[in-house]
Image (spheres, rainbow, N blue to C red):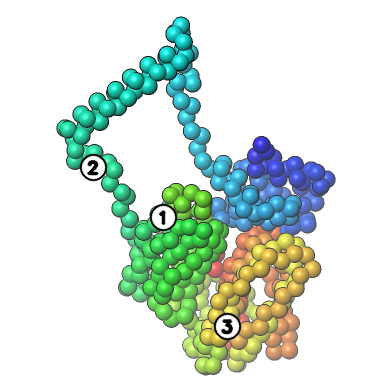
Amino acid sequence: MESLGEKLKSARENKKYTLDYVSRDTNIATRYLEALEREDFSVFPGEAYALGFLRNYGEYLGFQAEDLFSLYRALKIQEQPVPVEELLKNPSKIPKILLTISIILVVLGLAGGGTYFFLRHFPSEVVAAVKPREPAVYTMDGPSMERRFFRGDAVLVPLDAVQYRLELSGLGEILTLTTPGGKVTFDMSQTVDVDLNGDGVGDIRITAADFDKNHTASGAALRIEQNSLNLAEEALPASDAPVQESPVPASPTVTAVIFSSPNPYPFTLQAAFQGYCMFRWEILAERDRQGRNERYFQRTDELNIQAQNGIRIWVSNAAAVKLQVIGGGRTMPLEIGGAGEVVVADIRWVRDDDGRYRLVVARLD
């Protein structure tokens, strides 16, 4: 049976594609394609990134993403040790059937005697050994954390001097997280925003970095990150309310100013796709347009998104999409990242100290 890397390489070679050709066609850097075929995942900045590139490359070659994810997870499973009896040679001349019966009788005798001894002399220790695992409660003490959670485990997230509890309450076909605002569901490699304090703005982002729905007893590796912009202090207004005082933050994540105006106005984000790309978008601070949208786009696909206040986008390959912003009678091109780069960014209005409004690009990674 072919391994993950061999399967990818064989499919590419059967199509007579070179790595350089695939790189140009998918906008995935050659070093990442080579790493996938070598099964060398150490070159990726994180497991979620590796899975994203694996999905893009695999679907480009005609594979189902879940089949590739199964092979990837198989690579992570440590090999089971070879049983000792297979390493030993049997010098005995006794017929195999008699030897087998003798071994069974000896093992049963030892097991029965050992069980009786431990139950008689160490009953409390035996009970403790079979006691089920108690759910753990962790505390997020930095801007991000990543660890494996099991059903019932919880994490306390501090925000504005209050600790908010999130619990992994469901492990099955999808993951279920119980939050202060209700239950949130998501799948492998999917990222969700969670509003902790009920102000309508996502305070943290959670990604399922590793989860096998066929082996839920192994838990799920979750990555939890605070949004890099202080959105609780700079919340965007609803579409029917005036824009609040929100000075442009000094954070280096604000990468560009698109428009500047005495007053904010609606704008359109146009996306023209040059290759295979997973693209998610979410309208910010409009009560009647809440929720996230997600599609897998191919070459020549186009998308127009209209917004009053802001848009949050997630792009699996920044070079696979050409973006431009249209508003106030002007059109401006928008650069958000390079080839093979996974980008999360906001395009939104903020108010400067001088009272003017600026439409900015803010990276959230």
Instruction: Say whether residue 47 is left or right of residue 102.
Output: right
Residue occupied by mark 3: 289
Amino acid identity at mark 1:
Phe
In the structure shown, which secondary structural element does the residue marked by tag 1 occupy? strand
Q: CA distance from mark 2 to mark 3?
A: 54 Å
Residue occupied by mark 1: 149
In the structure shown, which secondary structural element does the residue marked by tag 2 occupy? helix
Q: CA distance from mark 3 to mark 1?
A: 32 Å
Residue 63 to residue 179: above or below: above
Do the CB atoms of the residues marked 3 and 1 lie less than 8 Å apart?
no
Residue 122 to residue 268: above or below: above
Instruction: Say whether residue 96 is left or right of residue 109.
Output: right
Do the CB atoms of the residues marked 2 and 3 lie less than 8 Å apart?
no
Q: In the picture, residue 188 is in which quadrant?
A: bottom right
Residue occupied by mark 2: 127
Tell me which label, 2 or 3, sits earlier in the chain.
2
Residue at point 56% right, 43% down?
74
Amino acid identity at mark 2:
Val
Amino acid identity at mark 3:
Arg
Residue at point 81% right, 47% down?
15
